[in-house]
Every structure is written in C-alpha cells, then in structure tokens.
Image: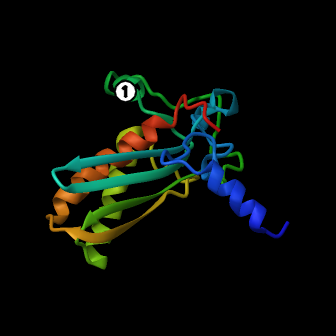
Amino acid sequence: VRPNAEHGRLALRAATTEPAVGRVGAGTGATVGKWRGPDHAIDAGLGIATMTDGELAVSGVVAVNAVGDIDDGSDPARIRDGASAWPLAVDPLGADLSTNTVIGVVVTNAVLDAGQCLVVAQGAHDGLARAVFPPHMRSDGDGFVAAATGEVEAPVDQVRMLAVVAVETAIRSTVGSLEG
C-alpha cells in the first residue's frame, strides 16, 4: 500500500511525546531466556532509558531478543557456589538460534567525534553484560552504535558511564512490558 495524505493524517493523530516500548517495532516477537530451552523463554521487546548528569543526557534505545535471561543474580550466585547453571538436558546452541540479538543505539547531546562514539558504543556492551546472563552467547548477534548531537562538552568517560546505565536500564525495562 502506497502511503497517501490520509495515512499522514492518521499518523499525526497517533503521534505522542511518549515513545512506544515493549513488543512493538523492533521488539515485536522478542523474547529472552531461551538458553535453557524454548519453554523458558519470556517476552522482552524494545526498551528506552535516559540518564542525565546536569545538562548531559545519554539515552539508550535497545531491541532485546537475547538467548540469555534478564539477570537477577541467581545464576552467577549458583556458579560462585560451585553449582553449574548450564542446562544439562538442553543444548540451546544446537538449535537454530541465529535470529537472536540485542541491538541498540546510544544517543547523547555531548560533543563527541567518531572515535569517541565508538568508545560509547563499546560501553553499551557493558550495559548489556550487566543486564543479561549469560551475555554475548555465540548465537547472539549483539551490536550497538552511538551518535552525538554536539551540544554539551563532557568527558567521553562520563558519557560512557551514563551509556552503561542507560543501556542496562533499557534492557531491564523490556521484561514484563505489556505494551504493543
């Protein structure tokens, strides 16, 4: 269907200042927790979070469809206690899990060059690793990019720190979201 003026009017009426989150857009059909087997999967989706420090703002927008769980600390605790968390009866990586990924963008109003944006995007992976366990499974295709609007002078490490928390918060917000 080719968009026309009526589609534009409908889109304008549906516009809101609150972005859609949950199982919408890139989050449609997304789940987490599949590493224990498909019957352990729970709904995830699209998450958004913004962290600020004075005038500096850093936002993470993340589509979460990970093999791992949203980390509540229980699996790492079992590993520290000497009890393996790996599901012995399930080989989650033996199945075709090539459709799993966590992808996102970090946007800041900081003044950053391309190399500094790369540093911030790398920091987004730290936020993922704080929120998902096990993170970065070989069947996940995780990736982040970063962009800066160039309005506020700030050290790149400060921006990266806020990016870690923004991405972690955005990922955690996807579980239990019923919107969409």
Camera-side residue of 72 and 77: 72
Whether residue 133 is visible to the viewer of this picture, yes or no, is: no
Q: Quadrant of the C terminus?
A: top right
Residue 85 x, y percent position in the rendering = 47, 28
Whether residue 42 is visible to the viewer of this picture, yes or no, is: yes
Question: Which residue is found at the position 57% from the left and 39% from the top?
Answer: 22
Occupied quadrant, residue 135: top left
Q: Quadrant of the N terminus?
A: bottom right
Occupied quadrant, residue 159: bottom left
- Mark 1 neighbour density, 10 Å: few (under 14) some (14–19) many (20 or more): few
Left or right: residue 7 compared with residue 33: right
Left or right: residue 63 compared with residue 133: right
Residue 82 x, y percent position in the rendering = 36, 24
Q: Amino acid at mark 1?
A: Gly
The colour scheme used here is rainbow
Q: Is residue 10 above or below residue 78?
A: below
Q: Is residue 141 above or below residue 179?
A: below
Element under disc 1: loop
Residue 144 x, y percent position in the rendering = 44, 61
Left or right: residue 109 compared with residue 36: left
Question: Which residue is found at the position 52% from the left and 39% from the top?
Answer: 68
Count of labels in the image: 1
Q: Is residue 52 above or below residue 117?
A: above
Residue labelled with disc 1:
73
Camera-side residue of 100 and 47: 47
Q: Is residue 98 above or below residue 23?
A: below
Question: Which residue is found at the position 61% from the left and 33% from the top?
Answer: 43
- The extreme right residue here reads 1
Residue 175 x, y percent position in the rendering = 52, 32
